[in-house]
Image (tube, grey):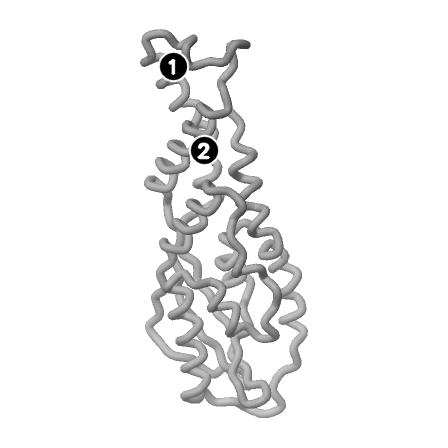
Amino acid sequence: MKISKLVSGLFAALGSVLLAGSIVTSFAALSKPAKAVKPTQEANACAQSVLRALDDGDLSKVGEYLYGKPGLGLDREPATTEGKQLWDAYRDSITVTTDEYCCGEGTNIYQTAQVSAMDIAGTLSQLESRASGLLKQKLESAEDPAVLLDENGGVPQTLKDEICGQALTQAIADAKTVTTQITFQLIEQDGRWWAVPDQALLGILSGGLN
């Protein structure tokens, strides 16, 4: 059984997020501060706001603290019910752990944290085999399997949708999490502090699908 509709629906909502890899290149080109910078209360407040929004799964809020407010599409929603179910489960799974505030390294200020979240790619990879198993089980348990099939002996779309939904729910329930270390830079611009995300943070914002 194909699950292309479910996967494409999720990808459609995250399309612009998947451009994160190119955006990080532009961040790397930022000029360094002209003089040594020490962690300040304002820098710490910005870093904690980023981590708090991330821990809440509010990815669009995280985007508000990123330098330049890049268009990552974090406020978009998946086009399908299944895609929304998966994306909501991913956001709910995010947890952030950190033991320290910002720290200065030379002329730069950084915040480090560990982020755990659902392995979306791994979860998606299980869907087809789970759906196939569920369909086989349903047909074998039916008194007359032919009743479940269409006039051509194929699986009707309504049954495919039902099976895919069950497979997704199971996959989410059994999903594994991965832990990633993020280290983002804090910079001051026009009296406000901003976060410059590293590739690891951008990967989390895109669900690890980039």
- Residue 120 in picture, x, y percent from top left: 46, 46
Foreground label between 2 and 1: 1
Q: Residue at x 48, y 77 (%)?
A: 110
The answer to whether residue 178 is seen in the rendering is no
> Between 83 and 29, which is closer to the camera in this rendering?
83
Q: Is residue 96 above or below residue 123?
A: below
Circle 1 sits in a helix, a strand or a loop, which is it? Answer: helix
User: Residue extending furthest bottom?
Assistant: 35
Residue at image coords 54%, 61%: 202
- The residue to which callout 2 is attached is 127
Give the residue type that dot 2 points to: Leu
Q: In terms of depth relative to the viewer, which is nearer, 188 or 8?
A: 8
Q: Find out whether the residues at labels 2 and 1 contact each other: C-beta distance under 8 Å.
A: no
Q: Answer few, some or many: residues within 10 Å of disc 2's Cα (few below 14, many 20 plus, some between 14 and 19).
A: many
The x and y percentages for residue 93 are 36, 54
Kindly report the distance in space between the C-alpha atoms of the residues bearing marks 2 and 1.
Answer: 18 Å
Q: Residue 153, position in %: x, y?
A: 51, 10
- Residue 162: image tag: none
Residue 171 position, x and y percent, is 38, 37
Instruction: Tell me the residue that label 1 is attached to.
Output: 139
Answer yes or no: is residue 148 visible: yes
Q: Which residue is painted at 58% across and 85% down in the image?
A: 189
Q: Is residue 151 above or below residue 193?
A: above
Which type of secondary structure does the marked residue at label 2 adopt? helix
Numbered marks: total: 2
Indicate left or right for 142 with 198 as reference. Answer: left
Image vertical order of residue 124 relative to residue 45, above or below: above
Residues 2 and 76: in front is 76
Judge whether 41 appears above or below 77 on screen: below
Instruction: Choose top left, top right, bottom left or bottom right for residue 39.
Output: bottom left
Q: Residue at x 38, y 32 (%)?
A: 166
Q: The disc labelled 1 sits on which kind of residue?
A: Leu
